[in-house]
Amino acid sequence: MKMLWYVLVTVTIVAAPGAAQASEAKCRAIARQEHPNDLQMQRFVYRQQISASRYMSRVRDAEVKEIAVREHPEDFVMQKFTYDQQSAAKRYMKTVRDAQVKRIALREYPADYVMQKFTYDQQFAAKNYMATVSDAEVKRIALREYSADFVMQKFAYDQQLSAKLYMAEMPNGPTKRRAIREYPHDYVMQKFSYDQARAGR
């Protein structure tokens, strides 16, 4: 048992400098690639990259680290940026309370916490908006078209309401009656049909 522990410690001690040297070499290569003819900028980029490399070697969330490394395998600075963004979004997603909206965000972006957060916020705002709308008929159209997406419900509601108000202002006549007959439950398509007919298309 003592022998096994000694071997593991020895391997760790030997491997650590090798990994550090590999990181330093990679940072130098990044700096040279970004600024092949500017030594001052190479030094600046190298310092940024080596600092980020050391940061990434100490991070604790393996799942988030995997996301950062996968997105930016050749750039430690961007790995650090991504890691911090994803970590903050992961913490945020643990605090959200609307389970229905959270399911939408997780379904759309199962492996990206930043996009989960963005989607959650967008969907949550749209859900609240849809709770306040006043035209029940137009709301039913939006819900029928996008039963599982509040953002698209909001978009559909706004489009349909605008088209409904437009059609209400148009004079009664055969063109309007035909558009309503063709699309009795879709004001957007009524408006489209009406405008096409008026344009002679």
Image (spheres, grey):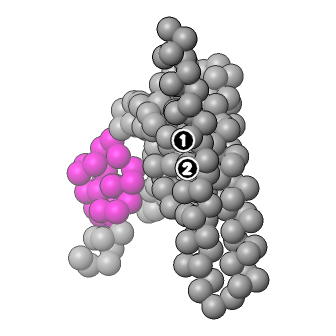
Q: How crowded is mark 2: few (under 14 residues within 10 Å), some or many (20 or more)?
A: few
Which residue is painted at 64% across and 31% down in the image?
Answer: 60
* Residue 198 or residue 136, whichever sits in front: 136
The majority secondary structure of the magenta stretch comes to: helix
> Does dot 1 land on a helix, a strand or a loop?
helix
Q: Where is residue 154 in the image (x, y as percent from the top left)?
A: 53, 42
Which residue is painted at 25% across and 57% down in the image?
Answer: 178
Which residue is painted at 32% across and 78% down in the image?
Answer: 199
Q: Which amino acid does label 2 sit on?
A: Gly
Q: Which amino acid does label 1 sit on?
A: Ala
Which residue is painted at 67% across and 62% down in the image?
Answer: 49
- Tags 1 and 2 touching, CB below 8 Å: yes
CA–CA distance in space, label 1 to label 2: 5 Å
* Residue 88 or residue 1, whichever sits in front: 1
* Residue 2 or residue 73, whichever sits in front: 2
Q: Position of residue 36 (x, y in %)?
A: 59, 86
Q: State the residue position of label 2.
A: 18
Number of numbered discs = 2
